[in-house]
Amino acid sequence: MALADRLLDVFREPLALSHGDVFVTASIGMAHMSSRSSSTPEDLLRHADTAMYRAKDAGRNCVALYDESMHERVSHRLAVETALYRALDREELRLFYQPILDLDTGDVEGFEALMRWQRGDGTIVSPAEFIPIAEDTGTINAIGAWALLEALIQLRTWIDDGVCSSIATMSVNVSPRQLADSGFPAMVAEALTRSSVSPHQLWLEVTEGIMIAEPELALATLRRLRSLGVRVALDDFGTGYSSLSLLQRFPLQRIKIDRAFVHGVADNPNDRSLVRTIVAMGRSLGLDIVAEGVETVQQMQVLSDLGCKKAQGYLISHPVPAEAMRSTVAGLERLGSFPGLRPTPSGRPTTVS
């Protein structure tokens, strides 16, 4: 450990190069022969390598000492990673859809496509687990291309079958790796053509990560997408940097208020103030606003009072498979508006006690 700490200290000093100072960080993994499974030099090196990746996962620029639990985690990740490569071919991936409700009219204005993975043995793998792996390995590009086309074809089918309005929209999540792919806009254009869906009916949801890490690349890609007529939403707004410069600089048309703020909007004055500020800011910039994770009538009441016009969450509907959407939309239409919300003469719901 003392040697590892000395190595980290060395890297804390910048490297002086001809074009300026460069800072380099080190992720260090260690293993020792006293480990029961480190019986050979090859084992020792492999375990040190495993610990090094654990140091990277822990935030980089630190030291990790190998233990048996790391081997279990690495083995599990490798198994998931290997299975993920064939998940598409085996048709194990599936899209579920969550309606987005217009609080002014009570109508379903669109849907968000959400990916699910059920392996051949029946095991459900959480998106929180396999999406980062797909991002790391690059399989997200193929998976994302499939999801986009699948979602758009489904929207076209629902429109043709009268399940939803002819102007309903589809929201699809896009990863930083997809945005970094120069061929991504062309792939989006092809999916729109093949599905016969109008570009303005597609919302691509992005997170602010790539806008911070690769701002020029993100700006160029988003501008190309906007030139197609596609609209762009900033997902999970409020949980990261959420800089005003993002809203000013990048071609965004929607912000989605993260569920972390929606959860406390009914009983936490700080969350309510933040949501009020986000809504007011978004409206002043001409942005569409959607609240995520709405689970109670009280949350919906407060959001409506604050001027948020669209919402999604378990109160409205859980994500459902495509074949269940007809009955889901019909049930929402029969409801008209949620208890505690009633339309005003202008058509906008208001809260009643």
Image: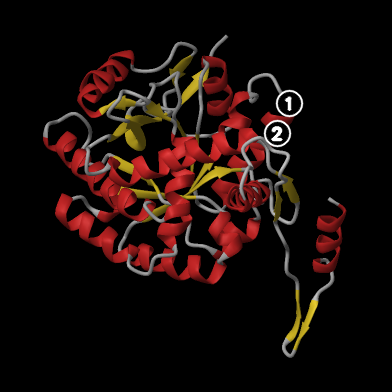
Looking at the rendering, which quadrant does residue 99 occupy? Answer: top left
Nearest the eye: 141 or 237: 141
Write the residue at 39% across / 65% down: 181
| Residue at the far bottom in the pictured view | 18
Q: Position of residue 100 (x, y in %)?
A: 38, 32
CB contact under 8 Å: marks 2 and 1: yes
Residue placed under numbered mark 1 in the picture: 269
The residue positioned 81% from the left and 74% from the top of the image is 14
Which residue does the image show at 86% across and 63% down from the upper left? 9
Side of 10 relative to 160 (left or right) = right
**Label 1 element class:** helix
In the image: residue 31, left or right of residue 136: right
44 vs 337, left or right, is right
Which quadrant is the C terminus positioned in?
Answer: top right
Q: How many angstroms separate mark 2 from mark 1 (CA)?
A: 6 Å
Query: Where does label 2 land, which residue?
Result: 273
Specify the amino acid type for callout 2: Ser
Instruction: Please provide percent x and percent y for residue 135.
Output: 45, 51
Q: Identify the secondary structure beneath mark 2.
A: helix
Residue 166: quarter of image: top left
Q: How is the image coloured?
A: secondary structure
Looking at the picture, how far across and down is residue 344, in whole percent?
45, 22
